[in-house]
Image (spheres, grey):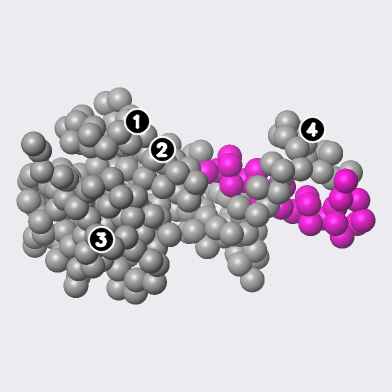
Amino acid sequence: MNEPLKIAILGLGEAGARFANDLAEMGVTVTGYDPNPVRELHPSVTLASSNADAAKDADVIFSVNLSSVSEEVAQDIFPVLKNTQFYLEMNTSSPDKKKKIDMILKPTGVQFIDLAIMAPVPPKGIKTPFLAAGEEVIAFLEKMKPLKLDLSFVENGNVGDAATMKLLRSIVYKGVAAVICEAVEAGDVFGMPEYIRKQISSIIGGNDDLIDRFVEGSKTHALRRMHEMEAVIEMLEERNLDPIVTRATRDNLVKLMN
């Protein structure tokens, strides 16, 4: 009988804590680390004393942090990494930053996977759709096969390709959400809420429930989505594009946080 997978979760915020709890529920041996853990964890999840302590004995390492600390996390665990481990860079970062982290860790021989989270985590947790890219992606899919996750991959993809596809998608989804938020607010101010909702529905083919989900989702996840749009801006500017609309989407999320 095969031993259960040992998985390390670096970052126990909304997404990381949910992944840790779901995996523990599935019988996976889970060790996690967060400098300020505040979310309730499954009784079998072990809290480590550092990123390196969590990662040292893991088969698979989930890095689920903010992009701003992703390089620091990689440097923290560098001394303990082995070529038998998989490192999943899951932070919402630009493709170039993911490539930079891959290069930081390359001397360790760790099998690096650019893994993009392709939908909000709370509804499905560890069963959320993921998109993987990297040289070791086929071996990674085989490793994770017993868990029956919703994993797809970029054929012949390199590190950064999954991040690119996620962030291009974000331009559309978060941009549409920003327009809906502003339109609903304007409709309320002008005393025409039903009229503006009818106009929105004529474009998105939805109803009031769908409009409300766009608005409430933007408010609830404003901070995370703001960081996501910062990554989009970084990606576009790296290609000498002027992200006018994406900046406005980012600014709308900043407003929703206040």
Q: Residue 67, percent across and down?
A: 37, 59
Res. 163 visible in picture = no
Q: Which quarter shows the N terminus?
A: top left
Q: Is residue 53 above or below residue 225?
A: below
Sequence-wise, the earlier of marks 2 and 4 is: 2
Cα distance in 3D space between marks 4 and 1: 33 Å
Mark sitting on residue 7: none
Q: Is residue 69 magenta?
A: no
Label 3 secondary element: loop
Q: Which residue is labeled 2 in the image?
A: 129
Q: Which residue is labeled 1 in the image?
A: 152
Q: Residue 218, percent across and down?
A: 61, 54
Sequence-wise, the earlier of marks 4 and 1 is: 1
Cα distance in 3D space between marks 1 and 3: 27 Å
Q: Where does the magenta region start and end?
A: 170-194
Q: Residue 160, percent across and down?
A: 32, 41
Res. 79 visible in picture = yes
Sequence-wise, the earlier of marks 1 and 3 is: 3
Q: Which quarter shows the C terminus?
A: bottom right
Label 1 secondary element: strand
What crowding class fits label 2: few (fewer than 14 Cα within 10 Å), some (14-19), or many (20 or more)? some
Q: Which residue is labeled 3 in the image?
A: 45
Cα distance in 3D space between marks 3 and 2: 23 Å
Whether tag 3 and tag 4 are in contact, CB under 8 A, the answer is: no
Q: Which residue is labeled 4 in the image?
A: 202
Name the side, left or right, on which 59 lies relative to 113: left
Name the side, left or right, on which 244 lies relative to 180: left
> Which residue sits at x=18%, y=36%?
143
